[in-house]
Amino acid sequence: MLSNDYVPGAPNWVDLGSRDVTAAAAFYGDLFGWQFRSAGPEMGDYGMFQLDGDTVAALGPLQDAHAQPAWTVYFHTPDADATTKAVEQAGGSVRFPPMAVADQGRLAGYTDPGGSEFAVWEPGTNPGLDRVGDGGLCWTELYTTDAAKAKQFYGAVFDWDFEDMPLPGDAGSYVVASRSGGGQQGSHGGIMQLGTDMLPEGTSYWQPYFSVADVDGTVARAAGRGGAVLMPGTDMAGVGRLALLRDPEGAFFALLHAADPADPVSPRS
């Protein structure tokens, strides 16, 4: 389960790159009740989504005119330079090298061998999101064409533990990722192998899940505000109710109302 007691390898930040920050802030504000607080032009118009005063996500304009709007999941690292070397040694590539954000911390961005983009945050004065779970990020999921290669890569970079959980029928298995030595209580995400024909863009990607009290109501609001419903509200035994969505600019995200809100686990288990 996610917590804001961040340890190396755990998700500790998530942000959205958008072509229209104002429109994106309005869409997610209507959807989740988040308030957007811009840090101003001096920070490149990057800003924070807040819920009851807690930072739950962030939003900023795309820095590359050719990039597609997308959510990026960040994982905690105590040393961004060491993680960069580990990424390269494991077969990944560096999208941007470690850089400082004043005294708040350092970030770096990468692409894994399957083409999925992700990032790391090395905390300074800012340890990460104030809130995860209720109303915020509650799970992270990698859709990939090669789960075995993904396990090898992320195991080498973050020292994650993995548990393969069989899916119903002949659908294969779902891989639960956990902090090293954390067991199921230390789980923070999953890896799902899909064929290119089942991936909306034909390529691998990381997707954030956000916790909501009413999945179906949130799906209806998203659809009414220009979002696309990739999978409507669906019950998963022992997990809860989830849905897969795409925002008006094309960024993928998901919703989850956990069966046990205190212990959200793999939405695919």
Image (cartoon, rainbow, N blue to C red):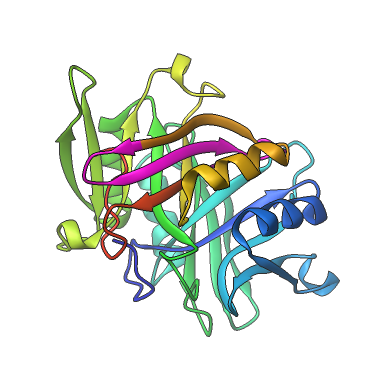
Residue 123 rendering spot, x and y as whole percentages: 48, 76
Residue 244 rendering spot, x and y as whole percentages: 49, 36
Q: Is residue 61 visible?
A: no
Q: Nearer the viewer, residue 222 or 54?
A: 222
Q: Nearer the viewer, residue 84 or 195?
A: 195
Q: Residue 143 is drawn in which quadrant?
A: top left
Residue 81 rendering spot, x and y as whole percentages: 45, 64
Q: Is residue 55 visible?
A: yes
Left-right relation of 47 to 157: right
Q: Is 243 colored magenta in this rendering?
A: yes
Q: Is 245 colored magenta in this rendering?
A: yes
Q: Which residue does the image show at 63% across and 53% down from the upper left? A: 31
Q: Residue 38 is drawn in which quadrant?
A: bottom right
Residue lying at the far top in this picture: please name it: 197
Left-right relation of 47 to 266: right
Q: Which residue does the image show at 46% across and 31% down from the upper left? A: 204
The prevailing secondary structure element of the residues shown in magenta is strand
Question: How many numbered badges does the structure rendering display?
Answer: 0
Q: Which residue does the image show at 60% across and 58% down from the upper left? A: 32
Quadrant location, the C terminus: top left
Left-right relation of 15 to 19: left
Tell me the magenta residue range. 235-254
Q: Which residue does the image show at 35% across and 62% down from the upper left? A: 10
Quadrant location, the N terminus: bottom left
Q: Nearer the viewer, residue 54 or 85?
A: 54
Residue 15 rendering spot, x and y as whole percentages: 59, 57
